[in-house]
């Protein structure tokens, strides 16, 4: 049943979201095209250092460190790929 609601929403949401995007984000949209909504990927990544840690105040989080010999312009995107894979 949820799939039916998703389909109805997807068919009708553009008429609402595009004007809201223009109004609140200040993006003047001249034209838009729908992209396929199913993304299939196979990615294998091997982080340099990744652990679930708990602090002395009981805060728990993922600590991920990548070692680099020089700055990489696209490093932020690589880190986002790791982040998406870890939370998947």
Image (tube, helix red, strand yellow):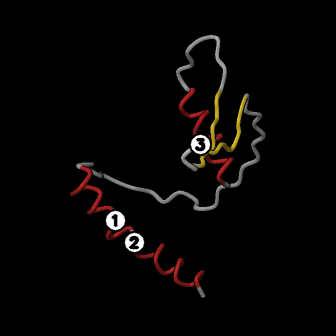
Q: Quadrant of residue 38?
A: bottom right
Along the polypeptide, which appears first: circle 3 or circle 1? 1
Closer to the camera in the image, 65 or 23: 65
Height in image: 70 above or below 40? above
* Residue 42 place in picture, x, y as percent: 76, 47
- Neighbor class of circle 1 (other Cα within 10 Å; few <14, some 14-19, many 20+) is few
In the visual, does 30 lie left or right of 40?
Answer: left
CB contact under 8 Å: marks 1 and 2:
yes
Q: Quadrant of residue 43?
A: top right
| Quarter that holds the N terminus | bottom right
Height in image: 74 above or below 29? above
Between disc 3 and disc 2, the foreground one is 3
Closer to the camera in the image, 63 or 9: 63
| Count of numbered marks | 3
CB contact under 8 Å: marks 3 and 2:
no
* Residue 19 place in picture, x, y as percent: 26, 63
According to the picture, the residue beneath numbered tag 3 turns out to be 55
Q: Determine whether the residue tagged by mark 1 lies in a helix, strand or loop.
A: helix
Residue found farthest to the front: 56
Along the polypeptide, which appears first: circle 3 or circle 2? 2
According to the picture, the residue beneath numbered tag 2 turns out to be 13
The residue drawn where x is 65% and y is 56% is: 39
The residue drawn where x is 73% and y is 28% is: 48
According to the picture, the residue beneath numbered tag 1 turns out to be 17
Give the alpha-carbon distance from disc 3 to disc 1, as whole Å: 41 Å
């Amino acid at each position: 049943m949820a799939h039916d609601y998703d389909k109805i929403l997807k068919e009708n949401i553009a008429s609402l979201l595009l004007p809201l995007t223009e109004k609140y984000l200040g993006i003047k949209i001249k034209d838009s095209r729908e992209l396929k909504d199913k993304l299939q990927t196979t990615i294998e990544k091997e982080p340099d250092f990744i652990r679930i840690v708990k602090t002395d105040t009981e805060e728990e989080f993922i600590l991920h460190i990548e070692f680099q010999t020089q700055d990489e312009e696209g490093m932020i995107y690589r880190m986002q790929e790791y982040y998406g894979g870890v939370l998947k």
